[in-house]
Amino acid sequence: MTIEITSPDVEALIQQHMQAGAFKTPEDLIRVVLRSSVPETRTGADLVAALQACPYPEVDIEPARGPTSVRDVSL
């Protein structure tokens, strides 16, 4: 596959990143950008797993359960 950069400003951005040492080749830059643009497909289960993998096991992630005060409401 051949990719042609026709926009001078895009080429300049690529050169800036490479000169700064952020990337060794244009392919490295493209790879990072493409991987970071993948839409998130995380679920609530992923969040729970991340919280349970917390390095602080003494932290309780379960909400406290107990009676709550409720006002009398007539509809």
Image (cartoon, helix red, strand yellow):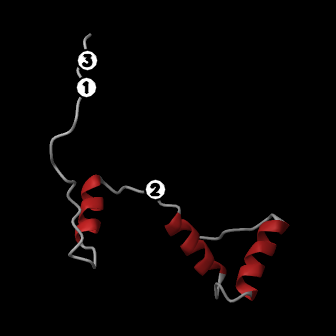
* Residue plotted at (21% across, 66% down): 60
Query: Residue 49, how many percent across, how many down?
Result: 24, 65
The tag earlier along the polypeptide, 2 or 3, is 2
Residue located beneath label 3 in the image: 73
Residue located beneath label 2 in the image: 39
Residue located beneath label 1 in the image: 71
Disc 2 from disc 3: Cα separation? 45 Å
User: Amino acid type of disc 2?
Assistant: Pro
Name the side, left or right, on which 8 lies relative to 54. Answer: right
* Residue plotted at (23% across, 20% down): 72
Label 2 Cα neighbours within 10 Å, binned few <14 / some 14-19 / many ≥20: few
Disc 2 from disc 1: Cα separation? 44 Å
* Residue plotted at (37% across, 55% down): 41
The tag earlier along the polypeptide, 2 or 1, is 2
Label 3 Cα neighbours within 10 Å, binned few <14 / some 14-19 / many ≥20: few
Q: Nearer the viewer, residue 56 or 73?
A: 73
Does the residue at mark 3 contact the one at mark 1 (Cβ under 8 Å)? yes
Rendered image quadrant of residue 53: bottom left
Above or below, comparing residue 35 to residue 20 in the picture? above
User: Amino acid type of disc 1?
Assistant: Arg
Name the side, left or right, on which 75 lies relative to 30. Answer: left
